[in-house]
Amino acid sequence: MIRVLLVDDHALFRQGLRSLLESEGMRVIGEAANGREAIRYAADTHPDVILMDIQMPELDGVKATQSILEIDPQARVIMITMYRQDRYVFEAVKAGARGYVLKDADAATLLDAIRRVAGGEALLDADMAQNVLDDFRHKREELPSEKHADLNERETMILKLLAQGFSNQDIALRLDISEKTVRNRLSEIFTKLQLNNRTQAALYAIREGIANLE
């Protein structure tokens, strides 16, 4: 059962999400109306997936996501936004959010996103990945570069599959290794490349030509 934390300042929207998710066998373990509540609930309950609205009072979704990921780098956050090109989405993804879903998406799209992220995937389409990479360059921020020579062949393959959206379970099946081995190898990859999370690792792999999203 996937455990979900809902974060949105509109109670009616949260009610609708709760009804949908519970009808699909997921468990809503908490609701937060602002970013500060989200941080507290996330630290207390460690949900499998956090659905995070961007625009909220007191503390917005981007800052809340950044704080949550500082506390728990493995937290899985999906941003909920009205606009595909929302500037805040880029900042959240750079901080480590697994991707985004539009508020007008249909139920099937949202449920698929939650299941994929709960399974370890990142929701990075080609446009989003390129836009975030362009944003790094524009602001003169850099992911580590010229480091992937430090990776062995198996680590490079794991990084490639991660960037292509495969979950730990799928990577394990494709490479005929255990999920525990995948987790351990990913931890080693993050350390070698000085990366903090899967989203940054996927972006790095795309930028360095290790993987593409086409």
Image (cartoon, helix red, strand yellow):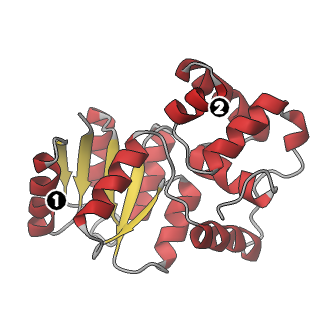
Question: What residue would you read off at disc 2?
Answer: 186
Which residue is nearer to you in this view: 156 or 61? 156
Q: Are marks 1 and 2 in contact (CB under 8 Å)?
A: no
Tell me what residue is drawn at x 47 percent, y 72 percent.
88
Say which quadrant the C terminus sits in: bottom right
Most foreground residue, 193 or 141: 193
Number of other residues with Cα within 10 Å of mark 2, as a class: few under 14, some 14 to 19, many 20 or more: many
Instruction: From the top left corner, tell me how far across and down residue 151 is, in percent.
Output: 83, 34
- Residue 8 position, x and y percent, is 23, 63
Earlier along the polypeptide chain: callout 1 or callout 2? 1
Q: Identify which residue is drawn at 74% across, 77% down.
A: 138
Say what amino acid the circle numbered 2 marks.
Answer: Leu
In the displayed structure, 139 sits above or below 95; it is below
Q: What is the x, y in percent for residue 193?
A: 77, 40
Q: CA distance from mark 1 to mark 2?
A: 32 Å
Q: Quadrant of residue 102?
A: bottom left
121 vs 213: above or below: above
Left or right: 149 as drawn, with respect to 4: right
The residue tagged 1 is: 17
Q: Image quadrant for the N terminus?
A: top left
- Does 170 sit left or right of 185 as displayed? left
Report which quarter residue 139 is drawn in.
bottom right
Task: Specify few, some or many for label 1: CA neighbours under 10 Å numbering under 14, 14-19, or 20 or more.
Answer: some
In the image, 31 versus 208, the foreground residue is: 208
Q: Secondary structure at mark 2?
A: helix
Residue 78 in which image quadrant: bottom left
Q: Can residue 37 be seen at all in this image of the molecule?
A: no
Which residue: 83% across, 32% down?
Answer: 153
**Percent x, y of residue 123:** 49, 57
Residue 148 visible in the snapshot: yes
Number of the label disc, if any, that sits on residue 200: none
